[in-house]
């Protein structure tokens, strides 16, 4: 049975039911992520299965998919970037409990009531999926800003070249001092 995950949920309660949940959130809800993007358009979809580990820790594993708008650093035009990642979370009440989780589980801190905010849970995972250098794919027509794509022409022999510091050189030659 598939259930729509609320934006705030109790991880322990869902873990006991081994529920399969889905959630769709606008990118604009992720404030730190949206600040790194061209705009807050797009949507993130999550699908996750809740369970309880052998140690009694509520867990969730699943995937995130979405599309975000970035600026190509080569041509400075907008581009779409697909996000697709898998995750495995362990829900804990303290930093000490987080340190005791197995390596394959990423810790998610619950509040005093055992609740978790979906936005806070997914935001770091989404930020980690952003490229370090945002560029169009090699096969796309992407020309660096200010270039026309034509080979630059070398100045003709005997042509005048602009030398902005030539006056400074003349001043230094004339300085006696």
Image (cartoon, rainbow, N blue to C red):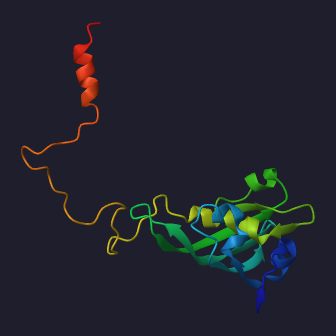
> Splitting the image into 4 quarters, where does residue 98 fall?
bottom right
Q: How many marks?
A: 0
Percent from the top left, x then y, of residue 47? Answer: 68, 81
Q: Which of the two residues, 9 or 89, is positioned nearer the viewer here? A: 9
The residue located at (13%, 49%) in the rendering is 155
Q: Which of the two residues, 94 or 51, is positioned nearer the viewer here? A: 94
The residue furthest right is 113
Q: Is residue 43 above or below residue 126?
A: below
Q: Which of the two residues, 148 or 46, is positioned nearer the viewer here? A: 148
Percent from the top left, x then y, of residue 145? Answer: 37, 61
Question: The N terminus is located in which quarter?
Answer: bottom right
Residue 114 showing in the rendered view? yes
Question: The C terminus is located in which quarter?
Answer: top left
The residue located at (33%, 66%) in the rendering is 143
The residue furthest left is 157
The residue located at (83%, 72%) in the rendering is 11
The residue furthest bottom is 1
Question: On the rendered structure, is 135 left or right of 45?
Answer: left
The residue located at (71%, 64%) in the rendering is 31
Q: Is residue 95 above or below residue 37?
A: above
Percent from the top left, x then y, of residue 168? Answer: 29, 25
Q: Which of the two residues, 43 or 38, is positioned nearer the viewer here? A: 38
Percent from the top left, x then y, of residue 96? Answer: 80, 50
Question: On the rendered structure, is 123 left or right of 81?
Answer: right
Residue 105 showing in the rendered view? no
> Splitting the image into 4 quarters, where does residue 172 fall?
top left
């Amino acid at each position: 049975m598939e259930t729509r995950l609320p934006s705030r949920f109790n991880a322990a309660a869902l873990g006991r039911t081994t529920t399969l949940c889905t959630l769709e959130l606008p990118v604009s809800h992720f404030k730190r992520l949206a600040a790194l993007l061209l705009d807050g358009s797009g949507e993130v979809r999550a699908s996750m299965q809740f369970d309880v580990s052998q140690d009694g820790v509520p867990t969730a594993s699943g995937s995130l998919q979405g599309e975000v708008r970035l600026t190509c650093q080569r041509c400075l035009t907008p581009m779409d970037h697909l996000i697709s990642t898998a995750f495995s979370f362990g829900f804990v009440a303290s930093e000490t409990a987080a340190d005791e989780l197995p390596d394959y589980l990423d810790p998610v801190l619950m509040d005093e009531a055992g609740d978790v905010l979906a936005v806070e849970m997914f935001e770091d995972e989404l930020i980690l999926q952003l490229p370090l250098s945002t560029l169009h794919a090699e096969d796309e027509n992407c020309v660096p800003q200010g270039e026309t794509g034509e080979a630059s022409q070398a100045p003709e022999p005997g042509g005048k070249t602009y030398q902005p510091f030539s006056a400074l050189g003349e001043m230094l030659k004339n300085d006696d001092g």
